[in-house]
Image (spheres, rainbow, N blue to C red):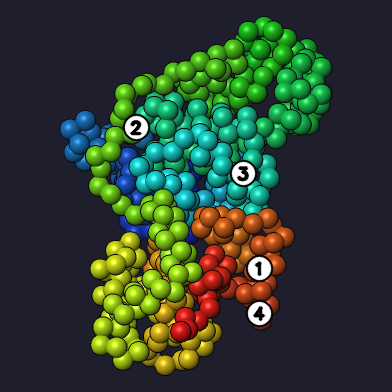
Amino acid sequence: MQITHHNKPCWVARAVAPRYLFHSGKSRWVISKQIDDGAHCWAYCQSDAGQDPSSCGASWICCDQDHEWRSDPSVKCTAVPAQHDKFVQLRMSLDSDMRQYGLVDPANVKELWKRLDYNGNGIVSLAEIDKLAVDMVAAGAWPAWLNNKPALMRAYKKTILKDGDGDDWVEKPEFHALLLNMFWFSKLWQTFEAVDSSHDRRIDVPEFIRGFQKLGLNLTEKEAEEEFRTIDSNHGGKVLFVEFCAWVRNRISPDAHANFDGDIVSGEHCGRSLRQHKGNAATHEHFISKKNLADFDSLEKEIKALASDHKKLHALWRILDFNGNGIVSLAEIDKMVVEQYPLLNHKPALMRAYKKTISKEGGGDGDDWVERKEFKQLLVNLFYFNKVFWIFDQSAGADLDRRMTLQEFKRCLVLCGCGMHDADARREFQSIDRNGGGIVLFDEFCLWFAGKSCPQGMVALVE
């Protein structure tokens, strides 16, 4: 691969299926579906830090059919020369491209999933995936070539039919494979379009012969015609995108089973449904309720309405300021949140919302108490800090002053449901980044987002 992990080289299967060989950073070489700490893997072997996995000499430990980890002498690791096929090299570049757009780090993938799985039921549809791609590209958080319907359809079908469990939904464990497939098929579509000079989504023999030179594949005209016939499985004289994908799959992984690509093996079967139907399992409601974006959206409407209703605001203030002295402490605010708004019961978000409310930057007077005139800002800050912290819980929880670049800022906007076009996002970023240093702090983003989402909540509550 073109990247390292724990300063060690790592390898990936030529096929797009997520299979990686990497070092855990401690004492193991690991085979897993994702480059991480190796805690969840298929196989591993003990290794000194400087050894190559093909020469370490240790036995590979695998999980057998009894779910026991045992040494398997039939598993071998052998070094072979690298392939220089154009499409193999394209596969090798996928992970570095995904890393550039924040799609490799498990924390970032989790954030994306929260935005995608709107109601928190653990499954998403093709339409929801398409909307995410459209929003991310429109905001400039993803490259324009990822908003591609034919490639997205191939990625979706490949994920649910081969990499997933065969139903009509993409589930959370399948999400990383979906992202990988989206990049792969979008890149293949770029190559397909370069060959398809007539742009009719079909490649004929003359286009294929001319296109081979663009692909850097040196074949005579006769050899190119023969290769075309191997791709054109239905002998229609045209190669469709699905047939092109199957041909590439065979080039990079010729030892894979022919059904590796499910229904994209042949273009003539591209509309056939191979999925299993599981009755109402996909919409079963008996699961543990967790926070989800739908709950936050519902509460957001309530908070916005409350911010415009002084009568209800004063009634809630009297509950909070039970002794009538006109000021409340952090402990009293915490008690109100637990009793009135359990969705917002998150201590790090509460602390940051409280501190920003009483600060002069946030419109307060700088003392340690929330006064009646600051109460409306407090409620709005409580909600939006919680929403943003929930989406970005891993990154924000680890470092409350996390620095955010422009690219990360645009991505955060989409995930928080405040997507903007690239130019607008750039202007907003510059308005927050007053010193022009190219970064904003995470809590600065939260405060800006609260004011942008509910401006009526940033006005002091007065009699």
Label 2: which secondary element: helix
Check if mark 2's residue and mark 4's residue have beta carbons within 8 Å: no
How far is disc 2 from disc 4 in space, using C-alphas?
48 Å
Question: 261 and 282: which one is in front?
Answer: 282
Residue type, mark 1 in image: Glu
Q: Nearer the viewer, mark 2 or mark 4?
A: 2
Q: Quadrant of residue 65?
A: top left
How far is disc 1 from disc 4 in space, using C-alphas?
11 Å
Residue 339 locus on image (x, y percent): 25, 68
Label 3: which secondary element: helix
Rendered residue at 57%/58% (across/down): 418
For label 4, the crowd category at 10 Å Cα-Cα, with few meaning under 14, some 14 to 19 and many 20 or more, is few
Q: Quadrant of residue 155?
A: top right
How far is disc 4 from disc 3 in space, using C-alphas?
30 Å
Q: Which numbered disc, 4 or 3, marks the residue that appears first in the sequence?
A: 3
Decide if residue 153 is in sight here: yes
Rendered residue at 28%/38% (across/down): 285
* Residue, disc 1: 428
Where 8 falls versus 275 (above or below)?
A: below
Residue type, mark 2 in image: Ala
Residue type, mark 3 in image: Val
* Residue, disc 2: 282
* Residue, disc 4: 434
Residue 394 locus on image (x, y percent): 40, 62
Decide if residue 106 is in sight here: no
Residue type, mark 4 in image: Arg
How far is disc 3 from disc 1 in space, using C-alphas?
21 Å
Question: 401 and 180: which one is in front?
Answer: 401
For label 3, the crowd category at 10 Å Cα-Cα, with few meaning under 14, some 14 to 19 and many 20 or more, is some
Q: Which numbered disc, 2 or 4, marks the residue that appears first in the sequence?
A: 2
* Residue, disc 3: 134
Residue 311 locus on image (x, y percent): 40, 73
